[in-house]
Image: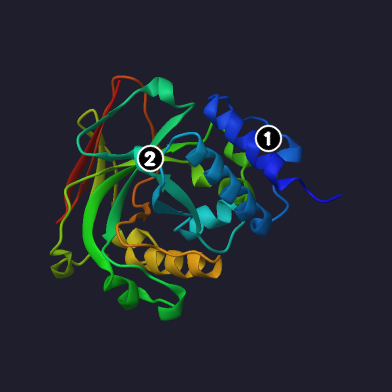
Amino acid sequence: MAQDNDGIARELYRGARALEPFDPVPAELRPADNAAAYAIQDTYQALAIADGVGAVAGWKVALTSKVMQQLVGCDEPCEGAIFATRLHPTPARVARSAFTNLGVESEIAVRLDRDLPAGEGPYDRAGVAAAVGACMAAIELIDDRAMVYAGLDAPLLIAMNAFNAGCVLGPEVTDWRGLDLAAAAGRMEINGETVGQGVGGDALGHPLEPLAWLANKLNQRGSLLKAGDVVMTGSIVATKWLKAGDEMTTYVEGLGEARLTVT
């Protein structure tokens, strides 16, 4: 019997909205494959928009390292939408009570200043670079609903909008072309202590590689990246988990910082 993808999307969204922990994962809520998972994600996003989270204002790229791809049994990245009400300028404050399990990642984000339609693709790093108007140090907020990762696979991650719960954006740097983004050193601090370090190239070798992948993937799915979209290009520091009272900062060489306080 065919899966009820719309029903799965409704139940996944209901549970996320209710902040319900998600372990163990019921077998009937597991998408059959990645194609089914993206169909579920589309409905999940539509439900969120109808619920008032705002329009899709950008995208995140997940699984940008081979280690993470192997962990969930996938040979490519995946994406999830970022909604308008969940884009926060630095310094930002969020309530811990608004999340089931609040995680943060340190990333390089980009803002596009023109569309990337299918007719001009497929895109490579140079092709997408021409559309990037600004780069920023950024924090991705994730909520995995306290899932035990031994039960996670790529279709489930995709269906759950890649766990995105928003982002915090540092000041826009428009003269970024003079920077070596792959070599740019980044670090995460929590309560003044460095808890992780990396470089821009930790995301598929260069932060614009995930952007090119995303542009092509969306085109294949009949969509596109648009002028004004923000794209989170992948974490350069392993996910950390925050509690009320924590203060967290992402620093990226040449791009400055993004700051978050959890209340």
Q: Which residue is drawn at 29% across and 54% down?
A: 109
Looking at the picture, which amino acid does disc 2 mark?
Gly
Residue 206 visible to the viewer: no
The x and y percentages for residue 261 are: 26, 27
Of residues 116 and 34, which is closer to you in this image? 116
- Looking at marks 1 and 2 on the same chain, the residue that comes earlier in the sequence is marked by 1
Label 1 to label 2: alpha-carbon separation: 23 Å
Looking at the rendering, which quadrant does residue 127 occupy?
bottom left
Question: Is 172 located above or below residue 44 in the figure?
Answer: below
Q: Quadrant of the C terminus?
A: top left
Q: Residue 193 carries which label?
A: none
**Residue bearing mark 1:** 25
The x and y percentages for residue 150 are: 62, 40
Question: Is 157 located above or below residue 73 in the figure?
Answer: above
Q: Which of marks 1 and 2 is in front?
A: 2
Looking at the image, residue 143 sits to the left or right of residue 42; the answer is left
Q: Residue at x 62, y 36 (%)?
A: 12
Looking at the rendering, which quadrant does residue 132 occupy?
bottom left
Of residues 127 and 117, which is closer to you in this image? 117
Looking at the image, residue 226 sits to the left or right of residue 50; the answer is left
**Residue bearing mark 2:** 166
Please give the count of numbered marks on the rendered protein.
2
Looking at the picture, which amino acid does disc 1 mark?
Val
Q: What element carries label 2?
A: strand
Looking at the image, residue 19 sits to the left or right of residue 229; the answer is right
